[in-house]
Amino acid sequence: MATIELRQVEKKFGDLHAVKPMDLTIYDGEFVVLLGPSGCGKTTTLRMIAGLETVTGGQILLNGRDVTWEHPSRRDIAFVFQLFALYPHMSVWQNIAFPLQAQGVPRQAVRERVAEVARILEIEHLLRQRPRGLSMGDQQRVALARALVRRPAAFLMDEPLGALDAELRERMRGEIKRLHIEQHATTIYVTHDQVEAMAMGDRVVVMSDAVVQQVGTPAEVYYDPANLFVARFIGSPGMNLVPCRYLGGAIEVSGSGRVPLPQGWDTALQRALGASCDVILGFRPEAAHVTSEGPLDATVYASEMEGGYAMIHLTLGGEGGPIVHIRAGRDSRYPIGTSLRIALDPGMIRFFDPRTERAIPREVGR
Amino acid sequence: METTLRRQRAPIVQAIRVDKISGATRLVQAIRIVLAVVYAVLSLIPVLWIGMTAFKSRPDATAVPPKVIFKPTLEGFVSLLTDRAILNEARRQELLARADELPWYQRLMVQQGMEVTGPSQYVGRLRNSVIIAGVSTVAAVVLGLLAAYAFSRFPVPGKGDLLFFILSTRMLPPVVVTIPIFLMYRRLGLHDTHIGLILLYTVFNLSFSVWLMKGFLDEIPREYEEAALVDGYTRLQAFFKVVLPNSLSGLAATTVFCLIFAWNEYAFALMLTTDRARTAPPSITTMLGRGGIEWASIAAGSLGFLIPVVLVTFALRKYLLRGVTFGAIRQ
């Protein structure tokens, strides 16, 4: 299969910097998700790897071979488009066989390979139909079959589930993941849906404003976001971010209370902040719980039943204070206006420097 | 991306039970059909009249009041397509004696006291029309398709201005430019040549075909070609294997429009040709001037002239009626 390496790859459309120079290595058999909001450059990156967009600078290597200026047809990469792009004038069978015919595969082999992928994707009964008559899910399967039949070095998928409704999307998500595990093919998958990214990716590349914000496993980007953007973007709702003051050994949330710093953080903050004492405290909704011994005062702003649990929205330190979201048991009832105290799980808190917006790394081993 | 929000769900298909349609709806429907039929009949009357006249004999064609029931004859067509000499009595008797050996058109003319001496000029002019209209249509459609593809897919510098310029060639009525073109053609030796008219008709149709084809090509999603590119095809192969089959209805429409223009064009043909390259439309009217008006011949000429365009349109109707893209990709 394939290793894909991007070295300082960038793309400009006139004055618009669509992708600022980025480095990224995708290892053999890996499932990498490019995740970011609309217009962050993730699709452009994918199209550059496929050769559908020329690069403005940098190099793209496929298995160590420089393919930066190689024609898309010679990169041995399959692309699944957001809108499937099935050829309407061809039957499903012809659609799937089309890439093989380009390679000059003998007829008998074409027939066997089309039959094989049709069996894998369970679309054997559709082979004679035209794509326009198919359901969205089946069109998606045909598009996947067309990519799979080539046995390419890598699969690139541009929001392949974007056109499907929620139920189908979850099912196809499972199918794509299963295919990836069976075929063990290097895959780059573009999506704006962070749930999809977390569920499918071996690693997630979070992009925003043409820049890679963080590359990491789903757990890394979730628990250890590299900066404020990632902290807000990942998770639903995102990480709670509370401006507070560092007071040496503890932090103070204005009007709400003081939280003693867990081990390792004190020196880290001291070193990172220098003379300043403004810092941003970050914690996930599940990292806080309501308890009468908690150090922070809060008032219930709203609460929502989310099914398995309840999400409580709290203001810290009276009216106008920062709003945070925490999870509580589904049986808990907190009427609006209730005053309560919350405690934070010491292992789950993170800090960000408000000047650079970057995460402050924790000191270990002291 | 944003498209997810705009995307529609599967269309709601509603079945209408025939027995639930109200009487009022059916009445409106009936009135509509009647109006459509009446309109169709009214607009077809002139065509029908031409058709009838074409098959009338000379006295029938000029009879007052006009005859609706008559004995059809091919006299009109024969006199349109042949040159004839008037027979003296001796020759007439001789020909009548061996009438059985003569071809049918000769027999028909001998009865009128004439002898067919050869094909008329009109045959050559019809051939000119076929050559000039055919070649210029193919040229305009092929060039238009390629230009439109470039405009539709690539960042052509000055695209908007170029497209406007192309359109602007169509803004003056052709008659306005006939005199300068006439003078130019005289100088260049293009006067009364096939190539001269072919060039002119191609240029006139090109603006039309570029714009029309661009509209059709814009409708074909780029992803089709991009898919073909990553599937291992070159751009040219992608064009022939993916773009072309999906633009057939556009090509058909453009072909028909270009053909109708080139086939019917009158003013340039009249001004820029005299004999060798003269096409059919100016020839039909010249028949008005020769001695008595040969209404049957004129009608035969007009009818014969209508038929090729009708045939081409019918041959291409499958593509004309089909939508451009057929929903395999959703925008």
Image (spheres, coloured by chain):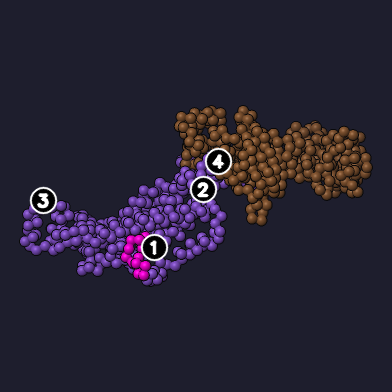
Q: Which amino acid does label 4 sit on?
A: Arg
Q: Is mark 4 on a helix, strand or loop?
A: helix
Color of chain A here? brown
- Residues at discs 4 and 3 in contact (Cβ within 8 Å): no
The N terminus of chain A sits in image quarter: top right
Q: Mark 4 lies on which chain?
A: A
State the CA–CA distance, disc 4 to disc 2: 24 Å
Looking at marks 3 and 2 on the same chain, the residue that comes earlier in the sequence is marked by 3
Direction from residue A166 to residue A270 in the image, left or right: right
State the CA–CA distance, disc 2 to disc 1: 30 Å
Q: What residue type is labelled 2?
A: Ile
Tell me what residue is drawn at x 91 percent, y 35 percent.
A293
User: What range of the chain is rendered magenta?
Assistant: B186-198
Q: Do labels 3 and 2 share a chain?
A: yes
Q: Identify the residue position indicated by label 2 in the image.
A: B220
Q: Nearer the viewer, mark 3 or mark 1?
A: 1
Tell me what residue is drawn at x 27 percent, y 66 percent.
B286
Q: What element carries label 2?
A: loop
Color of chain B here? purple
